[in-house]
Image (cartoon, coloured by chain):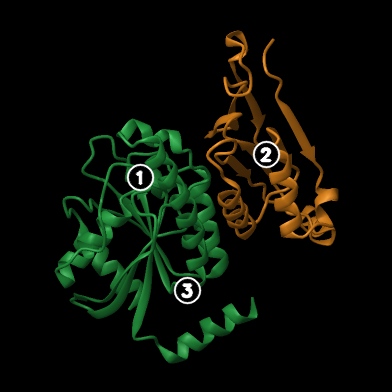
Amino acid sequence: MGQEIQLDFISSDSLSTKSSLEKIDLILNRIKNNVIVVLEEGLTPLEETELIEATMREIDAKDFHGIEFYRIDHKATRLREKIANYIAGKKMGMTIVGPTRVVEAIKREPDCISMLARGGEELSTSAQGAGKSTKKARKPS
Amino acid sequence: MFGRWFKKIFNIFKKKKVIQLGFYGPVNAGKTTLANKISMDWLGKEVGVVSEIPHETRHIQKIENVVVKTDNGELNMNLVDMPGIATQVDYRTFGAYGLSEEEAKERAKEATKGVIEAIKWLDDVDAVLVVMDSADDPYTQVNITIIGNLEARGIPTIIVANKIDLPNSSPSSIENAFPQHVVIPVSAATGENIEKLYATIQERLG
C-alpha cells in the first residue's frame, strides 16, 4: 500500500490572531510530521525569511532536510475588496509549504502552481508504494 | 522598524563613504565568481574560493575598500559575499561530488548556519546585488523571497543575470520575472558586460 500524503488547510481566520513566530511554529510542527500545509493567506517576505531561518535551525542529517514552499499572490483590484481586506487585516494569496521528503518540487506554470509530491522510499519500505503524484492548485485570478 | 527608517534617513544626510554591498542569491548562481571578478578588477585579489559543489561559500566573506572608478566618479565599497540562500540542505547530495558521508554532513551543517548568517546580514547591508543564474528558471521561491525582502526593507537592489556565456542563458526571463528592477546581464566568468554593471552600480549607488 502506498504512503498516504496529508494536506492541512489553515484558514486565514485562524492565522489572523497569530504572530509571525506562532505561524512559523505552526507550519514547522506539521512539516516535521510530513504534512503539507496550505495557508489561506500569503506569508509576508519577512515571514518567509523567518521560515527559512527556522527551517535551517531544524535541519538534521537523519530526518529533516528542509522545505519546499511557494506563495501565490493575489492582489485585490476592486476598491470594495481592498477595503474589506484592509478592515479584516487579510493578506491576499496563498502559501503552500511541504517537507522535501514529501514534496519533490513546486513549480510555477503560466496558469497554475504545480506540486510534485511523493510517497517516498524513506517513508515506506514498500517498493510498490514509492510513487509520485502531481497535485495542481489553480492560481487565483 | 523605526530603527530601520531612522537609519535610512540618517544615511541620506550622512552620505556614507563606504557602501556595504551584499551579494545575495540562490546556491551556485555565481556570487563568489562575481565578487572575485570585481575584487580582482579593482583590488587585484580574490574574495573566496569557487567550486561546482553546492554550498562552497558557507561563511560570510568580506573584502574591504574596493574602489570602483567609472566616467561618472568613484565608489568605495566593502564587498560582502553571502552563502547562497536555500530552503533545504540534504547532505546526501554532496556524495555525488565525491565527499565522504562525514564530510557531507559537516558541509551540510555549515551550510545551514551560512544561510542563517546571510539572512541576519540583511540588517547590515546598504545595497545588494542579487545574482541569478540566467540559464535557470527565475520563478523560484528563493528568488521571490530575496527580492520581496529587499523591497520590504527598502534596500537598493540590482539584479545580475549571470552566466550569459552559457548557450541556454536567458536574461530576458529574469527581466520578465522582475520587471520592477534593473537587470544587468553579465558573465562573471568571462567578464562579458561587466563594464555595464560598474556603470549601473555607480549610477544607482553613487
Q: Which residue is mark 1?
A: B172
* In front: label 1 or label 3: 3
Q: Disc 3 vs disc 2: Cβ atoms closer than 8 Å?
A: no
Q: Determine the residue positioned at 23% across, 53% down.
A: B188
Residue nearest the viewer, comparing A11 with A111: A11
What percent of the width, then of the height, locates residue B58?
39, 55
Q: Earlier in the sequence, mark 1 or mark 3?
A: 3
Q: Which residue is mark 3?
A: B124
Residue nearest the viewer, comparing B164 with B29: B29
Which of the labelled discs sits on residue A125, or is there none?
A: none
Q: Amino acid at mark 2?
A: Lys
From the image, state the color of chain B. Answer: green
Q: Secondary structure at mark 1?
A: helix
Q: Disc 2 vs disc 1: Cβ atoms closer than 8 Å?
A: no
Chain to which mark 2 belongs: A
From the image, state the color of chain A. Answer: orange
Q: Determine the residue positioned at 56% across, 43% down.
A: A60
Q: Which residue is mark 2?
A: A32
Would residue B101 be found to the left or right of residue B65 on screen? right
Classify A90 as above or below B122.
Answer: above
